[in-house]
Image (cartoon, coloured by chain):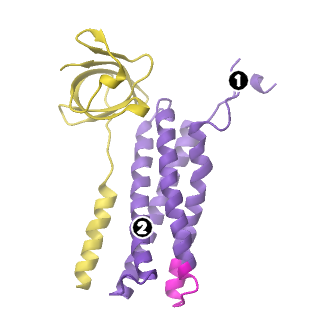
Chain colours: A yellow, B purple
């Protein structure tokens, strides 16, 4: 019983220590992927690329958001959408130049 | 000439607030450890109260940190450190919260079985949480002192202070 409790505690500790989202840094360029999460209050999106990388992108006033060639508001971005993002790597920060909603 | 920004801006709430739970959680852990090894209860209840305040403060610090995140992330050269800081802070708070819940259950006598074993598990969790707390603080300090997160950098001629 004592061993089981200690084992349960160890598993719980491992779960705690392994939780949390990891993000990746990529080179400047254009990437296609799926929006994994949208944080409207921070105008932030997480995009998961086809090769499994997670890009954390903070949209700014200079980021262009488009769908079918038309400019759209940030509120149009939703989880699960396929997007094409153009990013510029500054240090290890990814600045989104453009986000195109593909569907 | 740029003006000196208002001091009480959103990204400053976090450093203003975060040091209280850091002190409370470490002090609470110390009280619990001393209370356990001294076999006396005189430090145990104060330890629980301090830990409770620390856990409440810790979650508020996470909230203020989240507010700051949305502002400073756009200016950092390496936001991955911020992400590690955020992940580590959640781990810290879940560990302390878990330990506190079990400690409260025993203090309120809602459970009483395997007390000795749980006391050890609670202390181990608090020590683990303290380790994560120190690491989280280190990452936070790195963000401020290496990347000037949330910091106003005056011009070299200090013109805006004239």
Q: Is residue B81 above or below residue A72?
A: below
Residue occupying the point 39% across, 57% down? B91
Q: Residues within 10 Å of mark 1 (few under 14, many from 20)?
A: few
Q: In this view, does B55 lie above or below A82?
A: below
User: On the rendered structure, is B43 left or right of A60?
Assistant: right
Which image quarter is the C terminus of chain A in?
top left
Q: Position of residue A97 (x, y in %)?
A: 36, 18
The mark closer to the camera, 1 or 2, is 1
Q: How crowded is mark 2: few (under 14 residues within 10 Å), some or many (20 or more)?
A: some
Q: Which mark is residue A94?
A: none
* Cα distance between the residues tagged 1 and 2: 44 Å
Residue occupying the point 39% across, 75% down? B102
Labels 1 & 2 near each other (Cβ < 8 A): no
Q: Residue furthest bottom?
A: B39
Regarding mark 1 in the picture, which secondary structure is present there? loop
Q: Mark 2 points at which residue?
A: B128
Report the chain holding disc 2.
B
Residue occupying the point 30% across, 56% down? A18
Mark yes or no: residue A30 visible.
no
Q: Position of residue A45 (x, y in %)?
A: 33, 31
The magenta region covers: B32-45
User: On the rendered structure, is A10 left or right of B94?
Assistant: left
Q: Mark 1 points at which residue?
A: B3
Mark yes or no: residue A66 visible.
yes
- Look at the image and say whether residue A5 sits in the magenta stretch: no
Report the chain holding disc 1.
B
- Look at the image and say whether residue B40 sits in the magenta stretch: yes
Q: Is residue B43 above or below residue A67?
A: below
């Amino acid at each position: 019983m004592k061993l089981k409790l200690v084992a349960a505690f160890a598993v719980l500790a491992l779960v705690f220590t392994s939780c949390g989202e990891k993000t990746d840094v990529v080179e400047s360029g254009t990437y296609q992927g799926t929006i994994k999460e949208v944080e409207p209050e921070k105008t932030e999106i997480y995009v998961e690329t086809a090769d499994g990388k997670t890009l954390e992108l903070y949209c700014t006033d200079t980021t262009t958001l488009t769908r079918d060639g038309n400019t759209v508001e940030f509120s149009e971005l939703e989880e699960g959408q396929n997007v094409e993002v153009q990013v510029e790597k500054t240090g290890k920060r990814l600045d989104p130049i453009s986000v195109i909603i593909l569907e | 000439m740029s003006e000196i920004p208002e001091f009480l801006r959103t990204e400053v709430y976090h450093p203003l607030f975060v040091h209280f739970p850091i002190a409370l959680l470490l002090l609470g852990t110390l009280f619990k450890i001393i209370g356990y090894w001294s076999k006396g209860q005189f430090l145990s209840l104060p330890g629980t109260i301090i830990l409770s305040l620390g856990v409440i403060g810790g979650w508020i610090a996470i909230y203020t940190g989240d507010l700051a995140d949305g502002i400073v992330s756009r200016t950092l050269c390496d936001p991955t450190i911020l992400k590690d800081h955020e992940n580590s802070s959640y781990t810290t708070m879940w560990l302390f919260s878990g330990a506190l819940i079990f400690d409260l259950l025993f203090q309120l006598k809602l459970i009483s079985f395997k007390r000795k074993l749980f006391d050890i598990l609670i202390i181990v969790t608090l020590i683990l949480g303290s380790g994560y707390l120190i690491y989280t603080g280190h990452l936070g300090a790195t963000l401020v002192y290496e990347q000037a997160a949330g910091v106003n950098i005056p011009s070299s001629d200090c013109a805006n202070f004239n």
